[in-house]
Image (tube, grey):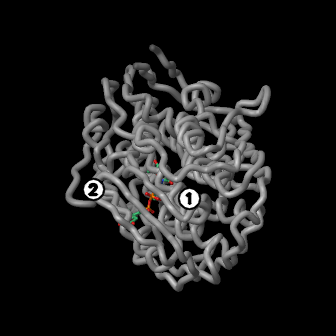
Amino acid sequence: MDRIVAHQSGPLAGEVIVPGAKNSVLKLMVASLYAEGEHRLTNVPGISDVLTMGALLGSLGVQVGFAEGRHDELVLSNSGDIAWNPPPENVESIRASINVLGPLIARCRRVRLDMPGGDDFGDRPIDMHIAGLTAMGVEFDTDATHIEARAENLHGAEIALDFPSVGATENIVCAAVHADGRTVLRNAAREPEVADLCQLLVEMGARIDGIGTSVLTIDGVEAGSLHPVSHAVVNDRIQAATYMSAVAMVGGDVFVRGARADHMEMFLRKLSEMGVDVGADPTGVRVRCNGRLRAVDVQTLPYPGVATDYKPLMVTLLAMADGIGVMTENLYPGRFRYVEELSKLGADIRTDGHHAVVHGVDRLRGAAVVAPDIRAGAALVVAGLAAEGRTIISGVEHIDRGYDDLVGRLAAIGATIERSA
Ligand code: EPU
């Protein structure tokens, strides 16, 4: 298993380019299930989850490969013969496999799916997916290990989500695309990645109004009427935040090209409050920092709030900020597993329920740590750049699921970091 070795670094300088978003590309790939023919996605990040999703789609009848000579462009060839029961081995390793549910119901009116895997943040229920789809006429037969669904009569419905769940919004929209009549989805998730999926579906011929807002109106179109398109994946706000956090942590002046300030407003505001100089233009965000950060309190919330995926980065920044910061996690109470690893580097963090109280310390010291999931892994790498000596991060396979060459990109802006087998 590979390891990342991070040495105390900084200041960082230069430019880093933000790749496409994991949480968009995986759902955009699934949309190829709707239409026979050749679909293209550009700005595809080089991450292992894309390969896992490619294998899942392959088992359903869509062959996925890279365009000739390209590592950031996918060609997805839908044979027209789509299966409704993917094998368990293609479903269990990523959470986004649940996203085949809506499209398969729309297209095949039938699905058999093992329960999806993904990062372990504790319980990750799918009751809102099921309630929404049930209101549209889908009949479920589920147990702890699998989901079986049929829809003889898939129809539009008025649905209000208890919470703006990303996955439930996406599955309901995807089923509604071919439902009979109109679906109105209230309290829908507004994340840029959800909007990117809706936009792609519209380009393919779906009828969706209210994209990017909390009320989505979907008028069903006839099955078979969607067509393949070419679409560029939205840039990844979480990868962008990772490079910004590295600069905030160890100082420097870096232009994060392709970072969408309009998608990261609350995160950027928090960085400014902490003392980072943030300057945005339509092509990216410049971050400059020299000196210690100031502690702030942060709460994770659905978009446009501070995303839960930024949280390990923010806790890492607080670990070396002046003062005490309280981080409150409102989405995944179990998402604090990396705190123990940060403590090995000397961070002073106490957790109580869904709060973490972080006392900023003067210095962190290198140690051997384990990445428990994608975002926490990246945060440990950022912490390693600030820690004295060297930090060895194992569990790199988690980071590879969502980061396109994190080590190479950090090294290019001056970090002393390498990957070893
Ligand atoms: N929830 C329910 N019932 C449901 C669905 C969700 O109770 O039916 C709860 C969840 O347990 C959680 C909250 O609602 O407490 C939010 O879950 P949501 O459905 O919004 O998240 P998701 O679709 O499972 C996606 C991302 C996550 C990201 C969250 C929140 C993908 C593949 N995953 O998950 O990304 O943290 O939205 O923004 O898009 C990551 O990329 O590292 C990652 C974990």
Which residue does the numbered mark 1 point to in the structure image?
104
Asked if residue 289 shows in the view, the reply is no
Which residue is drawn at the image coordinates 50% and 32% (left, top)? 400
How far from the left and from the top, in percent, is residue 52?
52, 37
Amino acid residing under circle 1:
Leu
Which residue is drawn at the image coordinates 39% and 40% (left, top)? 373
How far from the left and from the top, in percent, is residue 36?
74, 52
Name the residue furthest top. 421
Which residue does the numbered mark 2 point to in the structure image?
144
The secondary element bearing badge 1 is classed as helix
Q: Residues within 10 Å of mark 1 (few under 14, many from 20)?
A: many
Which residue is drawn at the image coordinates 37% and 49% (left, top)? 315
Name the quadrant of the N terminus.
top left
Seen from the viewer's position, the closer of residues 145 and 319 is 145
Q: Considering only vertical position in the picture, is 253 above or below 149?
A: above
**Who comes first in sequence, dot 1 or dot 2?**
1
The residue carrying mark 2 has its beta carbon less than 8 Å from ligand 1: no
315 relative position to 156: left or right = left
Asked if residue 114 shows in the view, the reply is yes
How far from the left and from the top, in percent, is residue 2?
43, 20
Indicate the quadrant where residue 347 lies. Answer: top left
Seen from the viewer's position, the closer of residues 30 and 111 is 111
The residue carrying mark 1 has its beta carbon less than 8 Å from ligand 1: no
Indicate the quadrant where residue 254 lies. Answer: top right
Q: Ligand 1 quadrant?
A: bottom left
Name the quadrant of the C terminus.
top left
Amino acid residing under circle 2:
Ala
How far from the left and from the top, in percent, is residue 144?
27, 56
Q: Residues within 10 Å of mark 2 (few under 14, many from 20)?
A: few
Indicate the quadrant where residue 71 lies. Answer: top right
25 relative position to 231: left or right = left
